[in-house]
Amino acid sequence: MTRGPTLPAHRLPSLPRPLDAFNAAPTDEARTLLLQCLHSLRWSRRVTDHRPYPDLDALLAAADEAAYDLSPGDLSEALAGESLPELPEGTYSAAHMALSAAQAAYEARFGHTFVIYLGDVHPDETLDRILEAIRSRLANDPEEERVVAAEELRRLAGNRLAVSLGGAGLHPSAAPPQGATSPNAPAVGR
């Protein structure tokens, strides 16, 4: 049996990458997108003002660098937009109570929500990792903890940017990590 001629391969039109759309967006739209990821107006402005970015790595580097220049007020603003990571489905109520108590102690000591990046933590280990980190970091002095919290905040923001602007499969960290702080999740104990 002979076959007829093969049809030419169908090519899909080239679609713009999310980063291209971000680079071309009006300033207010770009800043609004960044504000959802960074939670600080000044931080969002600094990153927006340096567009266009040639690639996601350049954007992530710029966001990271801009975070080092945040004033204590800017950092407080960014931290206020954070919440605790969501616990895995089926976590016992006693675990929620333990986490609420640890969070309350942390907030009383440092005046802001506890933040932690859990990018490589298995969901079954989320609670243990959070509680261990809160307990450990409660021993920090306030200035030392602001440095640690700022580093965790940079990692969380970088992940959110990678997810928002990286597009499907364009960046190794484009998949949301298990247990990372969710900008839309309510804080436990609030």
Image (cartoon, rainbow, N blue to C red):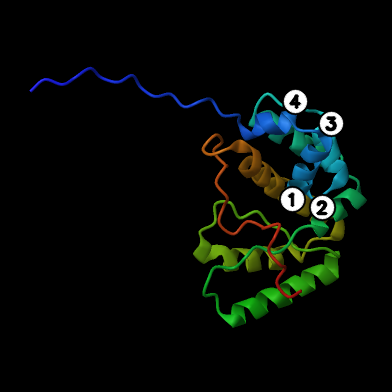
Sooner in the amino-acid sequence: mark 4 or mark 1: 4
Label 4, label 2: how far apart the Cα atoms are = 23 Å
Residue placed furthest toward the bottom: 94
Q: Residues within 10 Å of mark 2 (few under 14, many from 20)?
A: many
Sooner in the amino-acid sequence: mark 3 or mark 2: 3
The label nearer to you, 4 versus 2, is 4
Sooner in the amino-acid sequence: mark 2 or mark 1: 2
The label nearer to you, 4 versus 1, is 4
Label 4, label 1: how far apart the Cα atoms are = 24 Å
The label nearer to you, 3 versus 2, is 3
Q: Is residue 136 visible?
A: yes
The label nearer to you, 2 versus 1, is 2
Provide residue 100's location: percent of width, then percent of height: 71, 75
Write down the residue under mark 3. Answer: 49
The residue type indicated by label 2 comes to Ala
> In this rendering, would 103 be left or right of 132?
right
Q: Is residue 68 visible?
A: no
Question: Residue visible at 81% across and 68% down?
Answer: 107
Residue placed furthest toward the left: 1
Write down the residue under mark 4. Answer: 52
The residue type indicated by label 3 comes to Asp
| Viewer-closest of 16 and 81 | 16
Label 3, label 4: how far apart the Cα atoms are = 9 Å
Question: Residue visible at 67% across and 58% down?
Answer: 182
Write down the residue under mark 1. Answer: 153
> In this rendering, would 87 be left or right of 101?
left
| Viewer-closest of 182 and 22 | 22
